[in-house]
Amino acid sequence: MEAQENWINKLERLQDQAFKDLQQAHKETELQNWHVTYLGRSSELMGIFSHIPQAPKEQRPLIGQKANLVKQALESQYSTRLEALKQETLEHSLKSEKLDITLPGRKATRGRLHIATQILREIYRIFAEMGFQIYLSPEVETDAYNFELLNIPAYHPARDLWDTFYTTTPGVIMRTHTSPGQIRAMREFAPNPVRVVLPGMVYRYEQMDASHEIQFNQLELLAVGENITFGDLRGTLEDFAHRMYGEDVQTRMRPSYFPFTEPSAEMDVQCIVCGGEGCPVCSGTGWLEILGCGMVHPVVLKNGGYDPKIFSGFAAGLGPERIAMLRYHIEDIRYFWSNDVRFLEQF
Ligand code: DAH
């Protein structure tokens, strides 16, 4: 009888201890350890099971029953605790990983058009209103189109005006100006009239500094037809200057030299910074040069497929980056194509 009490007490103590320990298990690993300790193969409980055959015969059923009850109780407490722990972990992660969808989102950085593209589009709009179409011609050109057909023969000293990037293919170069597009447009449209703008990147083999780049945009203007005069050129460019810089801005033309125009000129606008008073931007002159222009040379007309006795035309070349530099007081042309977003974001 006494022995039986012992077995039963032992089992009850074991159960109490196990329940107490179970309350201390707060992690899944601790719970697993608990399971090994109290229900594992070498646990005290399993030891009792294996010793039951040594108990007096009549006591065995009672001890066995009790041992089974304890085992079931431990198993059931174990799975309840495991379930609770899983729930706790879930709630904790729900709380700590909570997403506040009412918080303002992170702003995406907005792309924008490059400043040169913006200026180009502004120029397109002005000339489109005057009836000019956009005509694109290649950036990789032949020596013939870039020079010869524009009345700049090989070894002519005027070639020194354009420092050229050559390719490894003889006769193929990077265009040094947009003027070769004049020949391409004329050859496509002749003998019909032409009224086009030719925009795009040009390349020069230059020593780079604040006012010299090896690449920049140009925009060429070309009108060919019958009875086109220098007056038309003057009127068109003055109209452009007024639309671009304001109705009141003064313009002036100075004689100049280009091999592909005769006569040739350069146009100045009143300094947009000082209004003509004289300042560092206009080197104290009150004027800013904005383009080169002239009447298309008869040789060039002929090369384009027009009879210079019947047809005449005017042309001009302007620099969009220069226009932007003057407008926004940008002091270094190298900013345009060095892709520094701190510069680009300002426009
Ligand atoms: N092609 C010239 C240059 O790059 C600019 C130019 C001057 C274009 C006079 C013209 C023009 O069409 O008439 O310096």
Image: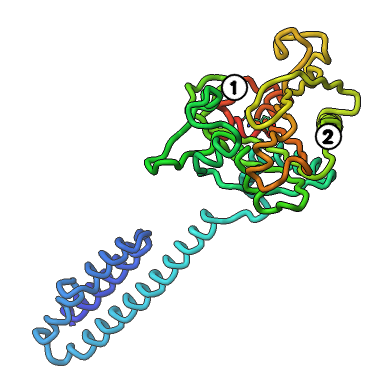
Amino acid type assigned to the residue bearing label 1 in the image: Asp
Q: Secondary structure at mark 2?
A: loop
> Does 21 sit above or below residue 12?
above
Instruction: Please indicate whether residue 67 sits to the left or right of residue 201 in the image.
Output: left
Checking the image for residue 313, the label placed there is: none
Between 56 and 277, the one lying in front of the other is 277
Q: Secondary structure at mark 1?
A: loop
> Does 139 sit above or below residue 53?
above
Nearer the viewer's eye, disc 2 or disc 1?
2
Query: Residue at 17% across / 88% down in the picture?
Result: 60
Q: Position of residue 298 (x, y in %)?
A: 69, 36
Q: Residue furthest left?
A: 54
Q: Position of residue 189 (x, y in %)?
A: 71, 53
Query: Residue at 40% across / 69% down in the picture?
Result: 81
Amino acid type assigned to the residue bearing label 2 in the image: Thr
Point out the image quarter for the N terminus. bottom left
**Location of mark 2 (residue):** 229
* Mark before the other along the chain sequence, 2 or 1: 2
Q: Position of residue 120 (x, y in %)?
A: 70, 39
**Location of mark 1 (residue):** 332
> Does 343 sit above or below residue 210?
below
